[in-house]
Image (spheres, grey):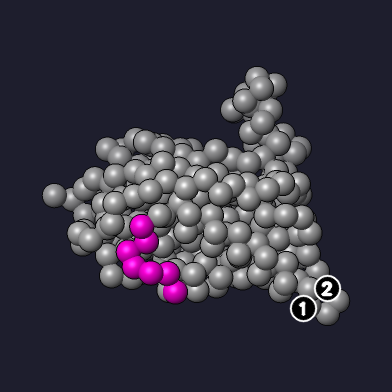
Amino acid sequence: MANTNGINSNRNSIDASKGKSPVHHETATATRQGDRATNQDRCAILSRETGVLLLLADGLGGEPRGELAAQVYIDSMGQAFEQADWPITDPAQFLVSSITRSHAAIMAAGEEELPPVRPMTTCVASLVQHPLACWAHAGDSRLYLLRNGQVLARTRDHSLVQEYIERGELQENEREQHPLRNYVTRSLGGTGPAPVVELSDITGLQPGDTLLLCSDGLWSALPETRLTELATASDLSQAVQRIAAEAEQASRPYSDNITLAVLQVAGD
């Protein structure tokens, strides 16, 4: 993907109640290389007591070592999660500050390469402290909150095509045919300051809710109605692997890397 960075880090935060009530959930991940020479996507699901941190990154292919940027993001966020006081009383502050630090870590890692490089990546993260969730993102990797077979919430892409759609210059169904469809307007790494991180409200999760984090290789290849079927899967792990394979097949011979990380709250 091509890229233009955001300008400043958004320090906005939202206070949340302490998450102390354990709620049963199931998680699953899948990643596929597609028709690309390498897989520059990364994801992780990390657990601590009553909380979970879901992470996903899509290294930008238009710059060298996108996979380095994605992996440093995962590692940096994981370290912040493990070192944070528990429970995390301000999820928004945690996500913004941790993502900002990962931006600096990516830049430092690029400088250590011989020769130095400027790797970049999209990012999306969700902190779940049952029964509350908060998420943040930069770029066009998405988070979906699925409830009762519907999309209750979805992140807004930071991309030129999304801006065209919002200005009425492009229709949603024309997104995938636009020549600048992969041009994101916010990312981590590169040479500029940390991008503005877009935050969700603190959101209460209900039994049966599903959080889906995914790279554009998934959501651009399949209709949204197919993604919502994950919420009713009887075997989440199998369903996640199956939908990744479907997305890969649907977009061949030009399949992108495809990655998803899913958390599903147990039913009543």
**Where is mark 1, residue-wise?**
112
Helix, strand, or loop for circle 1? helix
Label 2 amino acid? Pro
Residue 166 location in percent, x, y?
62, 25
Image: magenta residue range: 83-89
Residue 241 location in percent, x, y?
42, 60
Relative vertical location of residue 170 with respect to residue 124 in this rendering, above or below: above
Name the residue: 65% across, 62% down: 103
Q: In this orientation, which residue lies closer to the viewer: 222 or 202? A: 202
Q: In this orientation, which residue lies closer to the viewer: 104 or 184? A: 104
Mark seen at residue 137? none
Asked if the residue under mark 2 is in contact with the one under mark 1, i.e. CB atoms within 8 Å, the reply is yes
Magenta-span inclusion, residue 88:
yes
**Mark 2 Cα shell of 10 Å, populated few (<14), some (14-19), many (≥20):** few
**Mark 1 Cα shell of 10 Å, populated few (<14), some (14-19), many (≥20):** few
Name the residue: 38% across, 69% down: 85
Name the residue: 67% across, 31% down: 163
Residue 230 location in percent, x, y?
35, 48
Is 150 on the left or on the right of 40, as rendered?
Answer: left
Is 165 on the left or on the right of 63, as rendered?
Answer: left
Q: In this orientation, which residue lies closer to the viewer: 220 or 6? A: 6
Magenta-span inclusion, residue 262:
no
Helix, strand, or loop for circle 2? loop
Mark seen at residue 116? 2
The alpha-carbon separation of the residues under discs 1 and 2 comes to 6 Å
Residue extending farthest to the left is: 268
